[in-house]
Amino acid sequence: MSLNNPFKTVLFGFAFSPTLKINVLETSRIAHFFGAKLILLHVGSKSEEKERKIHEILSHIEHKSLEISIEWKTGKPDEVLLETCKSSGIDLLILGAVQHENLYQFYVGSIARKLTRKVCCSVLLLIKPSEERVPCKHVVVNGLEDEETPFAISNAFYVSHALGAKQLTIVEEIRQKEVAVDVEDDKSLKRVTILKERLKNREDSRIRKILKSIPKEFLGELKIKTQSIFGKRGYSIGHYAEVVRADLLVMNAPKKIGVMDRIFPHDIEYILSDLPTDLLIVRKTN
């Protein structure tokens, strides 16, 4: 898979909900900007009425040259989506939901948790699709120290370039325990301030090394910012994305679940429980 085009085949799992039309219009728009083939998959029975409805919606998409195929499969939604992503060589799985819509828990609740841990590709969770295009202006990506972070940042640059974003902010989440000094007087306050500055400089240096590998065509006139945040990973970046009104949050895919993950929530669980904006969870495909 080339970083210059990481999302060549996109799968959208859809249900016949009140938001189907705007989700299809938004998904087709994204696939067009990514130069991707779009597969629409309905997990459920096929009928003439359903076929008529989906084709009627597709007649309204903006980019008529987009390569689209429609598939119908039965079974448990999470199992069918997982199998299809693997068998069809999917690069990006898109799931659409509106936070206050009945299907929100269906797609962004338990199923999203299973998929983000088990699926073989990246996942895009849409919580604010639009019938008319709303330009993506600001993308936020995690810059935490992890072997997969350079890949996530590279994807964030690609998406920013493809969608025409104006700003990309790389958020360096630094665990509060790394500044484990009790502030009791001016001397200890000064120690904490110096320590935070050293940690920030360390993180900035690490990010600068990653940025050297970004293809020049992805940079353009994009405004690039780094932001250090001290706090709980996952929760902190989600809160930051909400405060700055980011249009898209990009995160590393969670590691495979283990015993400790069942006891202590993973970073991304905080975000999934209260999505601040559209969320792209990046995973390398084989």
Image (cartoon, rainbow, N blue to C red):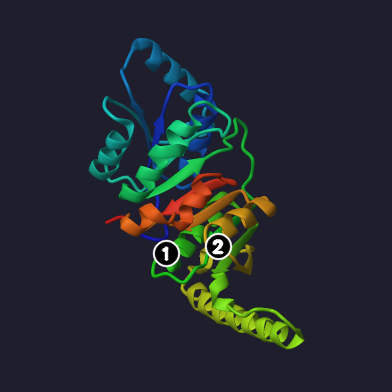
Q: Relative to residue 243, is residue 50 drawn left or right?
A: left
**Residue beneath disc 2:** 232
The residue lying at 41 percent from left, 41 percent from top is: 112
User: What x and y, as percent, mark residue 274?
Assistant: 56, 44
**Label 1, residues with CA under 10 Å away: few <14, some 14-19, many ≥20:** some
Picture disc at residue 159: none
The residue lying at 52 percent from left, 58 percent from top is: 234
Query: If the image is split into quadrants, where does the N terminus sit?
Result: bottom left
Q: Residue furthest front?
A: 184
Give the CA separation, mark 1 to mark 2: 22 Å
Looking at the image, is mark 1 or mark 2 earlier in the sequence? 1
Q: Given the image, on which type of amino acid does mark 1 rest? A: Phe
Camera-side residue of 272 and 16: 272
Image quadrant of residue 83? top left
**Residue beneath disc 1:** 151
In the image, which is nearer the foreground, mark 1 or mark 2?
2
